[in-house]
Amino acid sequence: MTAPQLFFAYFAVMITVLSLLMITRRNPVHGVLWMLVLFVHIAGLYIFLNAEFLAAIQIIVYAGAILVLFLFVIMLLNLKKEETVKKFQKHWLVGVGTGIIFAVFSVSIVRKIEVFPQLGKYTIEAVKAEGNIMTVGKVLYTKYLLPFEIASVILLVAIIGAVVLAKKRIE
Amino acid sequence: MEMETTISLLDIRPLVPELTMICVGLIVILLDLIVRKKEVVAIVGIAGTLVALYGTYKLYGFYEPQSAFSGMFVLDGYSNFFKLIFYLNIILTICISFKYMAIEKASFGEYYALLMFATTGMMIMASAADLIVLYLGLELMALSTYILAGITRKRQRSNEAALKYFFLGAFSSAFLLYGISLTYGLTGTTNLREIASALQTLDLNGSPIMYLGLIFMIVAFGFKIALAPFHMWAPDVYEGAPTSITAFMSVGPKAAGFAVLGRVLFGAFAGMQVQWASILIPMAVLTMAVGSIIALAQTNIKRMLAYSSIAHAGYMLLGVITGTTGGLMSTVNYLAIYLFMNIGAFAIVIMLRREGFQGENIEDYMGLSKSHPLASALMLIFMFSLAGIPPTAGFIGKFYVFMEVIKAGYVYLAIIAVAFSAISAFFYLRVVMYIYMKDPKEEVVLTRSPSMSIALAVTAMMVLILGIFPSFLLNLVRYSILG
Amino acid sequence: MLKYTLIPLLPFLSFLINILFGRNFIKDRAHWIAVPAVVGSFLLAVSAFLDVAGGRDINVNIYSWIVSGSFNVSVGFLIDRLSAIMLIVVTSISTLIFIYSIGYMHGDGGYYRFFAYLSLFVFSMLILVMANNFLLMYFGWEAVGLCSYFLIGYWFHKKSAADAGKKAFIVNRFGDFGFGLGVILIFLTFGSMDYMQVFGEAGGIAGQTINLLGYDVNLITLICLLLFCGAVGKSAQVPLHVWLPDAMEGPTPVSALIHAATMVTAGVFMVARCNPLFNLSEVAMNTVAIVGGVTAIFAATIALVQTDIKRVIAYSTVSQLGYMFLALGVGAYSAAIFHLYTHAYFKALLFLGSGSVIHALHDEQNMQKMGGLKKYMPVTYWVFILATLSITGIPFFSGFFSKDEILWRAYLAGDLGKFLWFLGTLAALLTAFYSWRLIYLTFHGKFRGTHEQEEHLHESPPVITVPLMLLAVGAVAAGWVGIPPIFAEHGDKIGEFLAPVLGYPEGEGTHAQEYFVMGASIFVAVAGWIIAYTMYLKKTELPQKLGAAFQPVYKLLFNKYYIDELYSKTIVQPTLKASDKIILGFDTYIIEGIVNGIPNLIGAFSRKLRKIQTGLLSDYGLIMAIGALSIIGVWIFLR
Amino acid sequence: MVPLSWYIILSAVVFSIGVIGFLTRRNLIMTFMSIELMLNSVNISFVAFSHYLQSMRGQIIVFFVIAVAAAETAIGLAIIIAYYKNNPTIKVDEINLLKG
């Protein structure tokens, strides 16, 4: 195994193990914490794939915003009882079986993937020359302007939605 | 493959209807703060939609194909026709929801704004020529409708509906993303047209990985359209959501789902028609079966209409399965007809709702003809149309689809569909029977409002007119799709 | 043009006015709208008939329903000789029944509603008859069905009535399923729905086949069989006949108009209309003939043991419809239409007469509780006699001519025809028997009802009896337009009249054969009468009086009858009872089992299936995931 | 060099783990986090494809997916809170008022 492969192997194993840890924790707070570690590893993988900007976003948005939101809600709901009740559903075995079959199916199909269409111009060198953030930014604000704007509307809807659903309304 | 692109202000032009909708949505929220009378807010919403409609009509001519934003956004007859459906959907929904939302104590600006944002999402979906735009449009629509389903937040049923819709919706969009990622990985692009050419040049039509990606995308679209076995959310959500939103959801997201299904399957994956048709055929049969059969045992009319809407999705899907332009036209035509008959039926359901009375049980309709002959006659028209009895529009919708199906060589599918449509007549006519051939249990008072009357008049007229003079609609569909 | 459009439009206007203003304004005056409307239709129909008889067929498109690319459907009216006769039948009988209903439905809570539905029915029936294309016919077809369900369940407070309406609906679903597919298939095959175009091009696709689940099926045969499915449902042929007897739960005028004279004959009309298609498919023709023949005899045997007066007539209707299909199946289209036309009068008369009886007895329908009504209701009695003479085929009454024509044509039509002729003649025997049995049980003998009922026995008012008398004229004389050529040159006016549309049946027999067939049918008619007479009238005064007057003849006859009776008591009746048990059992358990069973099965399935919808998020997710997995599994791994 | 398929297999495995979490957990919050896990697994494959195709598109998509995920989280948690106010439970198998 070459060094990059070892490096990947570490991340792959860690990501898989952390995912499993995350979904099996009884206490949601522990789940969130494992997920935080998981996200850091995914960010590491992104750096490994020359996507520094995304790695940063992954930490800032996912770990910094989304996970904090989760924690916040868990605290708000104050789920003490959760410690004592069963954490899995009655038919959890069926779920696990389905998931495993799912994994077997998809892995057995995608494992042969290596079809390469015509490669793009964003070689590692080209991106490095300009800097990852610069490259992403240029593309994002020119070619992908429309999706960018739509994303902003989605965030707006999220704000309105959260307010409408969760705020106290004076009747 | 990816080039430097510069954007000028002119490029925004094709987006004018969408921008109008978003701006009006924001205006509506602001207006809500200063205007006391909520009628004004609703009327501004309708007016804004009409402006957007005018924009769609005027922009480049209805049928002229245009593309913008480096080919991510297209304006053609197909998308414009769907936008027409979305406009009518939101206008009719606002008309029927006004008094109702006041009763539900949820008539505020955000409600109308979210309707407009959801509609914007659908419009973006209809115009999307790139999987990224498609995904974002879908999320915009979906997130808005999740909120709308739960907007009557004092009702536990509404909460539960929003909850289920949200969780299953998020689950399905994960599948969509998986599908997009595989497609991207294999073809190196997300543009629908480039995908189509990549499938040819890279010879991917037989690739199982490509197939897997397509299946995942179909799963997600099937979820939005409520195709079995991805329909499970629909009955619960339709029942729990506020009725006006149920009406909105049963047409809008379904139509948007068909818009992207048609665009993706016919635009990008036309070369894999054999494969996707073979996936969709059992799904269509299952959908029709589940919808028509389970509806028979329902006692709640919203739930019954939910199953009916599932069954109708099955009929519509038949048109897509053919893989022919004619089949696609028949599906689009069916959607337009379905809009009127379905919203009309829900409008009657809404009229039964009043302070302290849900009016959602089919038994509440017993003897309605005695006290409210006009409303009963309208319900009869809508039920006949949903059942596909001539001379209502529902008949022409079904007839056209079945014909295209037979024309494409799927005779057995047509036979199955006719059989299920025969079964479905039972539960529609059961409502009619309750209305006309039973004695009332208790006095039913209808909640009336002028806007409701307008909505009912429009839907009933359209159901009858499109049944007797369907050529107008058929030609509109024809020109929209053929250009 | 307006004239012809008005024919269906007038009843429709009557429907609209009554339904819109009936509740608040018109109330008990609904007939002032409905009757003039239908009379107007009748007069216009007569005028249209005269136009057509003058050699001018009317075929106009009213409007283009769909004009879109290659998808063109125009809708309009075709009044040719066939539809002209149907128009006369429908409007004339409707007129009389409308008038009758004024008296019969008097005082009913939904008087205006009744006339509104009835008018809507007439409108739909006229559309069905006048259509010049399959689409409009399909519309009329569905619409008459809907009116029929509504009118059967008109007295929806009665559970049996509501159930009967439901049953009619369910059974007709089976038939209409085929009919709808047939219409779609026609459109796809010919690219048009217009009769003229379809029939014109039918010859060109005679040998074409279509692949259905791996089998090559003749296209025309498939189309014809699908269309015939609809006819089987609508015209209550075996095995979909079960709804008609139950449909008698509706008001009697409805039974007369819809379930005897007009709607149930729509199937016959449709097959006759489509004769250019049916002529091309021997398989379809034979199917029609066999179904008709089997129905004729099957329904007749059931009628033998019914005690409900309306059910007897209902089974008799099924049986007579069977004759019509028998005629269609052997290619004697004009004979079928002829029988349709005579049958409409005498059967409407029988129903209305029974309505008069039921009315007089305050809704008693059991014949066991009747008897001796002759002296209380002379008019009703005599019209009943005339109708019975006609239906049993006694010479010179209208039923004789039409039934004889059918049997003669069947006799000429090869081996299968001979067999069907035998069935038909046997059914005629049974018809005579149960028809006279009905008369004797109802009108002769002692009154067997309650004392209270007896005191109120009275003849019905003129508004009821006048339509009866007018129908009686029809029942006697309607057949005189179809006198067999062996009696009078050009006597078969109706056959010749219809020949341009339906063709004149081929096949010539010798005069001797024709007399034999005729003699056989007269013989069975009289024999059935005599058996009924013996079994149900022997012990009353009347035969004894007759016997006293004609002592020697009576003795002889009596002794013969005695043997006959012995024979019937020891052999015929047990056999009959046993066979009826089997037939009735077949009817109740197998056919009803299927007809009710499928909906019940679906209903039970539905209740089971909805349990899958557990309401649990994770279950829904699981089903989605399993769904996706099965698609992947089947289409990627098993491909 | 790490083959592309490794990344894609990793992504498929993590996606399946997310599916398992969604299907088996009783706690709504955990269910929700399983969905986030599924989204992240897809992101891995997007970034991997982006790298191997030398195209920027995959990274851009991930950017949008993260934005949408943030919005989704806000709305989802708001819905959970709204539900909790009426019926204080977040156990998946106790939420079945609507069924049949």
Image: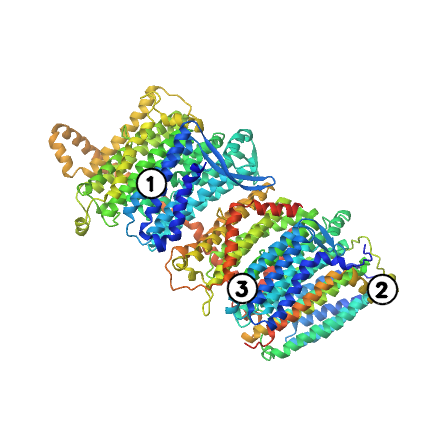
Task: Check chain identity for marks 3 and 2: say if they share one.
Answer: no
Q: In the rendered structure, find residue B97 and report the number of the disc placed on it.
A: 3
Q: Position of residue C352 (x, y in %)?
A: 29, 42
Q: Amino acid at mark 3?
A: Ser
Tell me the mark number nearer the camera, choosing from 1 and 2: 1
**Horizontal arrangement in the rendering, residue A163 relative to residue B442 (left or right):** right
Residue A22 image offset from top left, x and y in percent: 68, 72
Circle 2 residue: A2
Quadrant housing residue B368:
bottom left
Position of C471 compared to B44: left or right? left
The x and y percentages for residue C484 are: 33, 24
Label 3 SS: helix
Q: Amino acid at mark 2?
A: Thr
Q: CA distance from mark 1 to mark 2?
A: 99 Å
- Read off the chain for label 3: B
At mark 2, the secondary structure is: loop
Of all chains, the one bearing label 2 is A
Residue B63 locus on image (x, y percent): 67, 48
Q: Determine whether the residue tagged by mark 1 lies in a helix, strand or loop.
A: helix
Looking at the image, residue B364 lies above or below residue A163: above
CB contact under 8 Å: marks 3 and 2: no
